Image (spheres, helix red, strand yellow):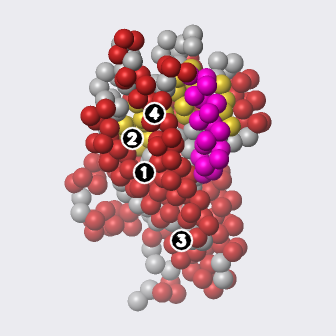
Amino acid sequence: MSQTRGAVLITGASTGLGRETALRLADRGFLVLAGVRKDTDADDLRQADARIEPVILDVTASESIAVAHKVITERVGEAGLAGLVNNAGVCVAAPIELLSAEDLRAQLEVSLVGPAQLIRTFLPLLRIRDARAELRAPAGRIVNVASGVGRLATPYHGAYAAAQFGKIGLSDALRRELAPLSISVSIIEPGAVATPIWGKLGEGAERVLAAAPAEIADLYRDRFLAFVTANGQRAQASRTTPAAVADAVEHALTARTPRTRYPVGADSKAVAVATRLLPNRLLDLVMERTSPAVTAPKEVRA
């Protein structure tokens, strides 16, 4: 490979945070192996930066992971991987009472089960760099992109929060397991960022309501839709950009001593502080005061 900084596999690279990070790492001299699910997304990335090498990869499919592993092993050879960035994610907002098993499984598969399988599959390639001491190459690094919701679960994001809490727990355990092997594990915790995921939330919310019994959907409809709309507006107005997330990923991959956690954005940093200092009941009260979405509907108030 002509790149001097090694190869990095990043999942969910077709849009949003993943795309921005892929472009950044390519610009910094990494060989970027960009995981995408569709050929059209691969073509789009090639047009954006010819240095990026897309890899068809569905993180929820064992067969797809196996094929991608074969392709990547042949590409990087004895150099191994400098990094694995588990960025792929999906969010379907729904009240727990209206959450289907399918939507729950989908979010856990993409954000928790998939990353665990990728880590297990690609760890041998991450260890290669540590084993080849004559290259003076650092061991490969793992960067897991989670969310501030992985510290503080918000209403209607129960499944997403479960996946992110799980991803953070997995990362903490993995970091301690891999420390003797000199493989670092960092967690990126973005707050609200203007990405395409927010537009999809509105469509998903309408689908969730349409699939529920009318009398149950009506209990949640106004508060739920107001919550989704407000979240989208906050994200669009957020000063936190995808570039800020790319900054954090770059630091985690290149710093002499990478951090274990990177809260990105004022909101994520505030959540990190609040969850350390405030008891749960006070956190509930703060959320109630700042979000009308958690106020009980008239039909069920005492």
In the displayed structure, 216 sits above or below 165; it is: below
Q: Earlier in the sequence, mark 4 or mark 1?
A: 4
Question: What residue did someone put label 4 on?
Answer: 124
Residue at horizontal 63 percent and vertical 86 percent from the top: 215
- Regarding mark 3 in the picture, which secondary structure is present there? loop
4 or 3: mark nearer the eye:
4
Q: Is residue 162 visible?
A: yes
Residue at horizontal 58 percent and vertical 70 percent from the top: 101
Question: What residue did someone put label 2 on?
Answer: 187
Indicate which disc residue 167 carries.
1
2 and 3 marks in contact (CB < 8 Å): no
Which residue is more in the foreground, 248 or 244? 248
Question: What residue did someone put label 3 on?
Answer: 95
Q: Earlier in the sequence, mark 4 or mark 3?
A: 3
Instruction: State how far apart marks 4 and 1 are (Cα).
Output: 21 Å
- Regarding mark 1 in the picture, which secondary structure is present there? helix
Indicate which disc residue 130 carries.
none
Which residue is more in the foreground, 284 or 43? 43
1 or 3: mark nearer the eye:
1
